[in-house]
Amino acid sequence: MPLQKKHRLSFEFFPPKTEKGASKLRATRNQLARLSPDFFSVTYGAGGSTRDNTRDVVLEGIRDGYAIAPHLSFGGDTQDSIRSLLDQYAAAKVERIVALRGDLPSGYGDGSRLVHASELVEFIRAHYGSAFHLEVAAYPEIHPEAESYDSDIGFLKQKFEVGADSAITQYFYNADAYARFMESCARAGINKPVYPGVMPITNFENLKRFSANCGAEIPRWLGYRIESYGDDLHARDQFCIEFISELCEKLLAMDAPGLHFYTMNQAASVEAICQRLGVNAS
Ligand code: FAD
């Protein structure tokens, strides 16, 4: 099934650390803008470590005329400093925020200081009313720290009940996980849109490491198949683009309301996948 006008399309970036990274990100953003996404989003480093970088990328993008959604978590910050950041976003006419608990940087303690995303959603609604559309995170393969499948869905429901408008999922490579998750969400009374997060496969070694940490499963057959290409990077990339495009088609056929791509600040794979889904660059 192709991606149609009714589907929401969004692209996620991380804030670069260097001027070289910043100019590469501008080029990526301008290239992906030709696919007419509904918005871009910019991640927020664990524990608030990219607070200024994230803000700068967001505000620059807005000045350049793009719809940009900052990710935000309390990390170790005070309510005052989160409000100061939100004031800047409100003044810049940011319309959407991705509200998260986040993770603490490694070596930062036992995690007991983390503020749940539902509390951040409540905090934003209490101080800013409906100024922002609030996105939250959802986990079709269940968050790695969740006590159970049902409790994780219960906490997602709570995020909606306190004011979230929609959710974006962690990436996954098994379409059935999303289908079952959406059935469970419906049974739990969740009726807000849940947009699948899609991670193109570019650097497989990094992806394996990252997936082990965030609880995203890479199917065994897929790992073997990708590794079987050895040094033939062109053939491997082509296979990965075909695989992810088929995953997206399956998700859209299951009535997913749109797609959110984790771009890793790279345009080529995302662009190739979107083109296979029938999105033409303007
Ligand atoms: P929560 O919703 O607070 O849930 C965290 C865990 O606690 C879950 O196990 C849940 O079941 C449980 N839980 C939830 N509420 C409660 C409660 N009230 N009481 C007890 N337990 C509860 N990380 C970053 O650092 N920066 C980013 O920019 C970033 N962007 C992301 C974007 C998306 C779309 C997604 C899916 C993830 C992103 N992450 C990001 C990762 C995310 O921060 C981690 O997965 C984090 O561990 C959980 O965040 P959360 O918002 O889902 O937390």
Image (spheres, rainbow, N blue to C red):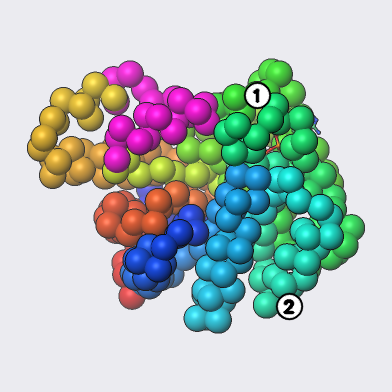
Magenta segment's dominant SS is helix
Residue 259, given in percent of the width and then of the height, sits at 48, 51
Residue at the left extreme of this rendering? 232
Q: Residue at x 37, y 35 (%)?
A: 207
Q: Residue 226 vs residue 180: left or right?
A: left
Mark 1, other Cα within 10 Å: few <14 / some 14–19 / many ≥20:
few
Q: Which residues are magenta?
A: 203-222
Above-or-below relation of 213 to 255: above
Residue marked by disc 2: 91
Q: Nearer the viewer, residue 66 or 105?
A: 105
Residue marked by disc 1: 145
Above-or-below relation of 78 to 63: above
Above-or-below relation of 35 to 144: below
Mark 2, other Cα within 10 Å: few <14 / some 14–19 / many ≥20:
few
Q: Nearer the viewer, residue 88 or 107?
A: 107
Q: What SS does tag 1 mark? A: loop
Residue 59, given in percent of the width and then of the height, sits at 59, 74
Q: Quadrant of the C terminus?
A: bottom left
Residue at the right extreme of this rendering? 126
Q: Say which quarter of the image contains residue 119.
A: top right
Disc 1 residue type?
Glu
